[in-house]
Amino acid sequence: MAWGGVGGGTRPLDAQGIRRIYDRLARLYDFLELPSEVLLGLRRCRRELVAKARGDVLEVGIGTGKNLPYYPPGCRLTGVDLSPAMLERAARRAARLGRTVVLLPMDAERLEFPDRSFDTVLSTLSLCTIPDPVRALREMGRVCRPGGRILLLDHVRSRVPWIGRLQDRLTPGNVRRLGCHLNRDSEALARAAGLEVRRVRRHRLGIVALVEAGPAWGPAPG
């Protein structure tokens, strides 16, 4: 068991530290993430995952709004993020796309919504930075309606031994710079949070994981 969740062993930054980093990086974030988007095929994964969203949707860690182009018509979107500067970027992207979205500054570990508020809860590339990802996933389960979907996309610790060991070695420095853990396991975190894991797919030597889950109290959607 690592600091803040399953996978790795590096102590995470606290919420204030994460906010400071991403407020500072917001202006360059999309540019800095471009290499991983290309090398890991993240754009295709985003499109595939976000297309499954339905109804009232909460995106946790919406960042600069990179998922906004991929939501199906009819989704009623709410996005939260710890960084106000990232939310400003998301608001600009939503305006360019003509997409209506409610954007709120909020800690993923303390979602300020009533139980069972959303049909879909989605988070992409956020569990790696959240100080306590299990607590955040429990919150996602709490605000998801019975039968709803919790959709996760993350880079995770590869099951290829030498790649996993490399991720372990690189993680401490990456946490100091970006607050980002390279070696967490989103499937294990979801199970530790008590979510019902319905489907897991891995890509790119097991480094990218798409997890479809739901609150334990509801049946899977048809």
Image (cartoon, rainbow, N blue to C red):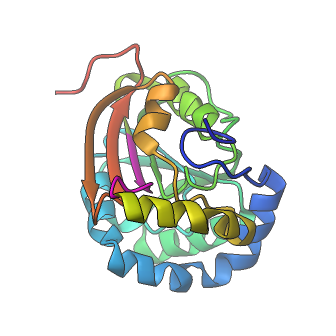
Q: Which residues are magenta?
A: 151-160
Residue 73 in sight here: no
Left or right side of 94 for 22:
right
Residue 75 in sight here: yes
Whole-percent x and y of residue 30?
Answer: 52, 80
**Residue closest to the eye, 125 or 175:** 175
Q: Residue at x 72, y 61 (%)?
A: 83
Left or right side of 203 for 152:
right
Q: Residue at x 40, y 39 (%)?
A: 187
Q: Is residue 157 magenta?
A: yes
Whole-percent x and y of residue 202?
Answer: 27, 53
Left or right side of 188 for 220:
left
**Residue closest to the eye, 188 or 100:** 188
Question: Against 128, is 215 above or below?
Answer: above
Whole-percent x and y of residue 75?
Answer: 36, 47
Place residue 221 in its image quadrant: top left
Q: Residue at x 68, y 63 (%)?
A: 172
Q: Is residue 128 magenta?
A: no
Place residue 171 in its image quadrant: bottom right
Quadrant housing the N terminus: top right
Whole-percent x and y of residue 35?
Answer: 43, 83
Question: Against 81, is 171 above or below?
Answer: below
**Residue closest to the eye, 133 or 74:** 133
Taking the view exactly as shown, the residue that stands out farthest to the top is 217
Question: Against 105, is 20 above or below?
Answer: below
Question: Against 76, is 129 above or below?
Answer: below
**Residue closest to the eye, 79 or 137:** 137
Quadrant housing the C terminus: top left
- Total tally of numbered discs in the picture: 0
